[in-house]
Amino acid sequence: MPSTTADPRTDGLEGVVMGSTAITMVDGERGRLAYRGFDVSELAGTVPYESVMHLLIFGDPPSADPSPEIDRALRHGRGWPAFVRGVLDALPPDQTPLDALRTVWSALSPSVARYPPTLDEAYPLVALGPTVVAAAAHRRRRTSPPPPRDDLGHVANFLYALTGTEPEPRRVEALETYFVLLADHGMNPSTLALRTVVSARGDLASAFVAAISALKGPLHGGAPREVSAFLDRVRGPERAEAVVREALARGERLPGFGHRIYRVEDPRAVLFHDLARRVAHGSERLEIAEAVERAAVSALSAAHPGRRVYTNVDFYGAIVLETAGLEPDLFTPAFALARTAGWTAHVLEQAGSNRLIHPDLRYDGPIDRGRWPRPPIRPSDRSGATRAR
Ligand code: COA
């Protein structure tokens, strides 16, 4: 396959501003992240996910915590519509929870795009998300999911749905903090995909399907799972330097390091590191992670003196997800579930002042290749021509 020429100044849309947002401020130079003006350090560990979702969508804090409106909508929507069970039953038994969620969202998409999207269309997708992910996880383990509990919050119910046991408070705290810190991050590949669908007046469910598809790869939402696999490979803190060196020598990207926007430490990485120090204190896993961080930051700084590379959200985020008791193939689904709050806000914001998103590509293929190398085939000859070939 012929390849095209890369131009690092424009490729990957780095630094391209495609519109404005009042949802989330990401300041990559100062390492600051704020939802509707509230620094995430103010919210993480203290404000429930439902209230953060409220803030992102409505623009102001709710009247009480957790947000009564969001709490009611999410509790109400977590039961099983019968046809969703049918969709899951039709999937291959080893379908990953992430793919199962994408497929169910796709099945919930209307056949003709409804526009403009409404908040009432988002609630069932967000509320049902944990139920679907947990059911897909049970299916792979050949166990049965428990019926949803409507006396638990959104995050605690997700943990309950996964295990069928009362979730331990420290696990709920870890996962709720994860959900809050991952709830939105301004522009990024999945939010771009989502807003692009809406900009063409697509429906909300189709936009969610586009977003989760863009999230799946290891450079975006697939990264925390790769972090966990990398730490497994290291096995002990004393091996960190050698494993990092070998990986870089093979040209691998170290998962959990680097970011398109942050030129200083990702504030979420700092908060997750603090949380990990608290909830995973003294564990060998944390020691391995810290040894990998030291080795990677020093090797990457030496290799790229002009562009400092630090841990990103997914590095200590993976330790936090492990502490919450999630298996690695639930990490990307957890990321997607957390991000539904931001995706909802972005769908509504895009539809609120919409212009079709339609960027351009620099064409660098051949310009004029003249005539086709064989004589023309008349339409009436077509079936014969296919057979003759
Ligand atoms: N491991 C090894 N090298 C890395 C790296 C990493 N994690 N992150 C960046 N680099 C290197 C790049 O190879 C590049 O080197 P080059 O100029 O010699 O090609 C240089 O640092 C600059 O990075 P760049 O490719 O311009 O960054 P980007 O903005 O295009 O990519 C990421 C950002 C996130 C895709 C990238 O840092 C990465 O692949 N990280 C690992 C995956 C990950 O953790 N993703 C989650 C992101 S939140």
Image (tube, rainbow, N blue to C red):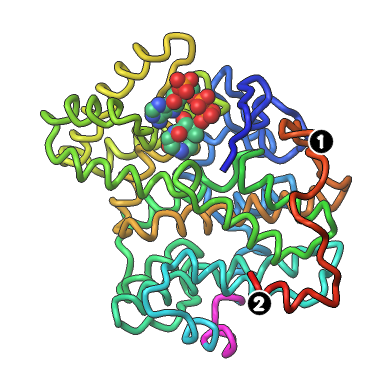
Percent x, y for residue 217?
48, 49
Instruction: Give above or below for 118 relative to 224.
Output: below
**Pair 2/1: label in front:** 2
Q: Looking at the image, how many numbered discs can be counted on the residues?
A: 2
- Is residue 215 at least partly visible in the picture? yes
Q: Which element is circle 2 on?
A: helix
State the CA–CA distance, disc 2 to disc 1. Answer: 31 Å
* Ligand 1 lies under 8 Å from the Cβ of mark 2: no
The kind of residue on which mark 1 rests is Asp
Whether the magenta-drawn stretch holds residue 80 is answered as yes
Q: Residue at x 43, y 68 (%)?
A: 97
Q: Residue at x 64, y 50 (%)?
A: 342
For ligand 1, tell me if the residue under mark 1 lies within 8 Å.
no
Say which label, 2 or 1, has the lower sequence index.
1
Relative horizontal placement of residue 294, taking residue 123 as reference (left or right)? left
Q: Looking at the picture, which amino acid does disc 2 mark? A: Arg
Q: Position of residue 64 (x, y in %)?
A: 63, 55
Image coordinates of residue 16 in percent, x first then y, are 72, 28
The residues colored magenta run 77-85
Pointer 1: residues within 10 angstroms few (<14), some, or many (20+)? few
* Residue bearing the label numbered 2: 387
State which quarter of the image contains the N terminus: top right
- Circle 2 residues within 10 Å: few <14, some 14–19, many ≥20: few
Is residue 315 shown above or below 207?
above
For residue 41, side relative to residue 113 (left or right): left
Residue 140 included in the magenta stretch of the image: no
